Image (cartoon, grey):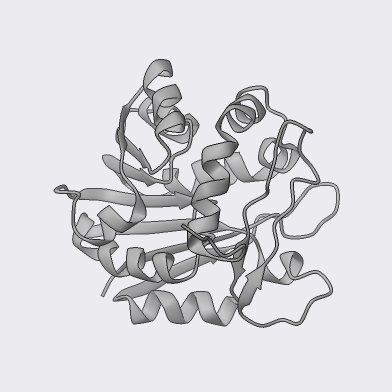
Amino acid sequence: MDISPLSDRQIVASWHKNVTPWIQAVRDRQIASREAVTNQAILDTIGAYSLRSLLDVGCGEGWLVRAVAAQGLAAIGVDGIPGLIAAAQQAGGGEFRVMDYEAIAAGALALTVDGVVCNFSLFGEAIVEQLFRAIPALLTANGVFIVQTLHPVVACGNLPYRDGWRTGSWAEFSDAFTEPPPWYFRTIASWVNLFHASGFRLLELREPLHPQTGQPASMIFVASRR
């Protein structure tokens, strides 16, 4: 099957090829921004809400599920890359399932939780919009949807500040990574509109700052069902 170099399918294809170096990068703490800012930022955000159960969509090798489960939450992680889920299951510390975004969007997850989190796991275009529409049904009445993603103002670079596909890069990672996944750039306004169009009410927006640069290291949305 021909896969466009700038598409949702190519994101998945790239991750299938980079399972091993990604696991090593996360577990060896090689990703500086995560160690300095964003890992703690997502944990702080989750901790600010009275959650008893959490679903991590795009959980990767499972570090976040293990972290919140250790704090007493009933945590489940899902990811569409079998190699990542296998590593998560081997490490334990939570429940992990292989499930891609298309399946979740189609209603394959028969559960409700107090919180759904997407931690740097929403880089596609159409599939992200489909997934957003499915999330409200997964939340309890007072549940929250938490998304941490690249800060558009910083991630935009010198390109025009408008929605569109961008080529990926492993520039800050080891040479073990190959064929970087593309990603779909969204402005802040587009993110806000996506939440509203999907049946959410925004509760807060956090902009964690990098301690060295003083620039936003990420952007964290917290939303509830309308």
Residue 125 is at least partly visible in this image:
yes
Report the residue at 80% width, 69% height from top. 157
- In this view, the residue in front, 35 or 165, is 165
Image coordinates for residue 26, horizontal then vertical, percent: 62, 30
Q: Is residue 23 left or right of residue 145?
A: right
In the rendered image, the vertical position of residue 212 relative to residue 62, given as above or below: below
Q: Is residue 45 left or right of residue 164?
A: left
Residue found at the very far front of the displayed protein: 1
Image coordinates for residue 172, horizontal then vertical, percent: 79, 43
Report the residue at 32% width, 75% height from top. 198
Res 10 quadrant in image:
bottom right
In the rendered image, the vertical position of residue 54 relative to residue 213, given as above or below: above
Image coordinates for residue 108, horizontal then vertical, percent: 18, 51
Residue 140 is at least partly visible in this image:
no
Q: Is residue 183 left or right of residue 103?
A: right
Image coordinates for residue 159, horizontal then vertical, percent: 79, 76
- In this view, the residue in front, 49 or 86, is 86
Of the 4 image quadrants, the one containing the C terminus is bottom left
Report the residue at 31% width, 58% height from top. 102
Q: How many marks?
A: 0
- In this view, the residue in front, 178 or 137, is 178
Report the residue at 53% width, 66% height from top. 205
In the rendered image, the vertical position of residue 159 relative to residue 116, given as above or below: below
In the rendered image, the vertical position of residue 204 relative to residue 96, given as above or below: below
